[in-house]
Image (spheres, rainbow, N blue to C red):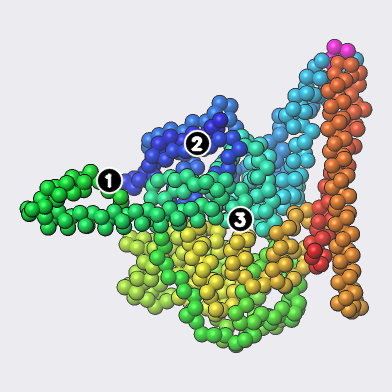
């Protein structure tokens, strides 16, 4: 059954038609990804589907009684709430129902006739998820790494924390249809992985816009491609869509070229023999030509950007050396050596101090020693530029000494053509600002680049371009990113910052971060051994510790399963007793005991996972 149906949707901004005749339907259980370059209208289409905008033509219809949830980058919250209060607003009806259950239970002590009312209320409470919602809140909080912020006032949360709160609130609302617009922008690697697992288990319908290929590949079962004002449906995930789209483009190009060749041959024959002995055959070919359905040349968008970052003077072999550097009160960097050509991915949970590391190494302190002839360029998350109220052409003239012709030429290479080249810096969208920042970076000719989440505002096509440019880059790169595919394609080694530790190593650190769960926060820290151990002894200890932790996790999960089954059995018992239930207070108390025990087990499970992440041994 179709939960959502869009029929012949068209929308324009002024005289510019954004898209037209867009039609699709979304059935229960289907998970669609909506893709397309920046500016094609993906967010506009979402806002139409959510009822925030009206289409110029066409209509959107939903199945009766549908509950839909829309996630955007501009959440609004109730004033005065803590983070946990805000999540509990989703379940206010259950809180009221639980109070009614308690009241009915007390009445049963004195009125035998209250048993029927109690049973009806209890059944309703259970059917609507009353026994599970607190556990669900904890799962989502830990999955999105918000569990340490439960009591924090919403007004004091950072922008990224508010975005994650909005996502948590939407997931917990259990809609039939979810519309998610860039849900991974403020998630770390482990949270992206958790979200993918959560969305895979989601029973409703999903429409997703994201630039995270890991999420798209692991969640989407269909892809809607919005290009040149039209919408096309492809089966499979994002990688399968890309392959199929390339094959379709090649096939259409082949058809176009074959028909063009045939038309040229027919026209040549008609011109040559129209008035001669073969005029009858020429007329026949002319009729054939007139009846032919013309195949238009396939229209597709491609960035023509020449993103070359290699026009620099080489640095010395040793690029960066840090002896001992405390980074705020978060962790200490010890004995870091970076050599020319290293491409290092910097990973770790949100708030662990990745951006703080970038800031710390910029400070002129004795512990930080940059190598000979090092020229650094920073690409920060806020896309900081030197001046805001200035046209792009004037910016390039003032800071890079390009005349108007040179400035417009290089701007055109980054798709700022015509009037767009006269835009002021402050008027640029997020995607445009990212492109302009990358343009300035190429003009700086750095031999060391430090990038903090460079893909946040870019569309897929430009991410591919940047990925290729950084792969070809022969300088030294420090890259903070939550995009797993992006990191794997570019980086040779990794720095992982987590739980107050700074660790440098190979791709096993990325694997550790992928598997990392958000149940962190254990205050216990292992004391560093003063005595030096041989590698064999150390490895043996780590192996034994790792295996022990794995066994403890299995035991913990087994106990969680048993307690959850006990809760289920208790619920069935209460249903079976029905009107014969004289007093439910004892069962209510038993339920609370089991619930408290489960909460403790979930906390213990999280701490055990945190300990396995600290262990350096990997199976």
* Residue 368 location (% of width, % of height): 68, 80
Q: Residue at x 62, y 70 (%)?
A: 491
Mark 3: secondary structure: helix
Mark 2 lies on a secondary structure that is strand
Residue found 85% across the figure and 43% down from its top: 560
Question: Which mark sits nearer the N-terminus, 2 or 1?
Answer: 2
On the rendered image, what quadrant is the C terminus found in? bottom right
In the rendering, which numbered label is found on residue 77?
Answer: none
In this figure, which residue is indicated by the disc labeled 1?
293
Q: In the structure shown, which secondary structural element does the residue marked by tag 1 occupy?
A: loop
Residue position marked by numbered label 3 in the rendering: 214
Residues under labels 3 and 1: Cα distance? 41 Å
Q: Does the segment drawn in magenta span residue 113?
A: yes
> Mark 2 against mark 1, which lies toward the viewer?
1
> Which residue occupies the foreground of this view, 383 or 30?
30
Image quarter for residue 591? top right
Identify the residue shown where x is 35% and y is 71%. 409
Assess whether mark 2 and mark 3 are in contact (beta carbons under 8 angstroms). no
């Amino acid at each position: 059954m179709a939960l959502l149906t869009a029929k012949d949707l068209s929308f324009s901004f002024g005289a510019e038609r954004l898209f037209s005749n867009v039609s699709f339907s979304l059935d229960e259980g289907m998970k669609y990804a909506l893709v397309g370059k920046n500016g094609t209208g993906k967010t506009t289409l979402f806002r139409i589907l959510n009822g925030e905008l009206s289409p110029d033509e066409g209509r959107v219809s939903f199945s009766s009684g549908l509950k839909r949830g829309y996630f955007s980058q501009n959440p609004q919250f109730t004033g005065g709430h803590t983070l946990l209060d805000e999540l509990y607003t989703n379940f206010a009806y259950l809180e009221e129902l639980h109070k009614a259950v308690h009241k009915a239970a007390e009445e049963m002590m004195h009125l035998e006739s209250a048993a029927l009312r109690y049973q009806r209320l209890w059944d309703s409470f259970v059917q609507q998820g009353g026994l599970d919602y607190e556990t669900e809140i904890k799962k989502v909080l830990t999955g999105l790494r918000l569990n340490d912020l439960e009591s924090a006032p919403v007004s004091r949360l950072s922008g990224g924390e508010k975005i994650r709160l909005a996502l948590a609130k939407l997931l917990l609302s259990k809609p039939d249809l979810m519309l998610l617009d860039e849900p991974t922008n403020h998630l770390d690697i482990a949270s992206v992985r958790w979200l993918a697992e959560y969305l895979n288990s989601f029973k409703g319908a999903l429409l997703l816009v994201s630039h995270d290929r890991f999420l798209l590949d692991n969640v989407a079962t269909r892809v809607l491609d919005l290009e040149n004002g039209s919408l096309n449906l492809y089966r499979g995930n994002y990688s399968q869509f890309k392959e199929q789209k390339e094959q379709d483009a090649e096939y259409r190009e082949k058809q176009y070229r074959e028909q063009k060749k045939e038309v040229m041959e027919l026209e040549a024959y008609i011109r040559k023999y129209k008035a001669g002995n073969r005029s009858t055959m020429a007329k026949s070919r002319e009729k054939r030509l007139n009846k032919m359905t013309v195949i238009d040349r396939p229209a597709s968008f491609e960035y023509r950007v020449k993103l070359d970052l290699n026009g620099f003077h080489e640095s010395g072999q040793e690029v960066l050396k840090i002896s001992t550097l405390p980074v705020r009160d978060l962790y200490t960097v010890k004995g870091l050596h970076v050599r020319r050509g290293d491409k290092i991915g910097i990973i770790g949970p949100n708030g662990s101090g990745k951006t703080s590391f970038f800031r710390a190494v910029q400070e002129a302190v004795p512990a930080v020693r940059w190598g000979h002839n090092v020229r650094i360029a920073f690409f920060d998350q806020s896309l900081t530029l030197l001046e805001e109220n200035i046209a792009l052409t004037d910016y390039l003239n003032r800071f890079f000494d390009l005349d108007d012709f040179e400035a417009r030429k290089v701007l055109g290479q980054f798709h700022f053509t015509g009037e767009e080249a006269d835009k002021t810096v402050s008027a640029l969208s997020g995607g445009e600002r990212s492109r302009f920042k990358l343009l300035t970076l190429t003009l700086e000719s750095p031999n060391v680049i430090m990038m903090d989440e460079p893909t946040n505002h870019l569309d897929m096509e430009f991410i591919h371009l940047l990925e290729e440019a950084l792969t070809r880059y022969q300088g030294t790169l420090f890259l903070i990113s939550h995009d797993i595919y992006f990191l794997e394609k570019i980086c040779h080694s990794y720095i992982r910052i987590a739980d107050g530790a700074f660790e440098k190593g190979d791709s096993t650190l990325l694997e550790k971060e992928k598997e990392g769960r958000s149940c962190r926060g254990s205050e216990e820290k292992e004391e560093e051994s003063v005595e030096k151990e041989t590698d064999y002894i150390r490895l043996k200890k780590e192996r034994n510790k790792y295996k022990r932790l794995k066994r403890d996790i299995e035991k913990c999960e087994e106990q969680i399963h048993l307690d959850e089954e006990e809760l289920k059995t208790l619920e069935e018992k209460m249903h079976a007793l029905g009107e014969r239930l004289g007093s439910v207070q004892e069962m209510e108390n038993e339920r609370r005991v089991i619930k408290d025990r489960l909460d403790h087990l979930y906390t213990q499970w999280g701490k055990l996972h945190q300990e396995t992440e600290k262990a350096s041994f990997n199976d």
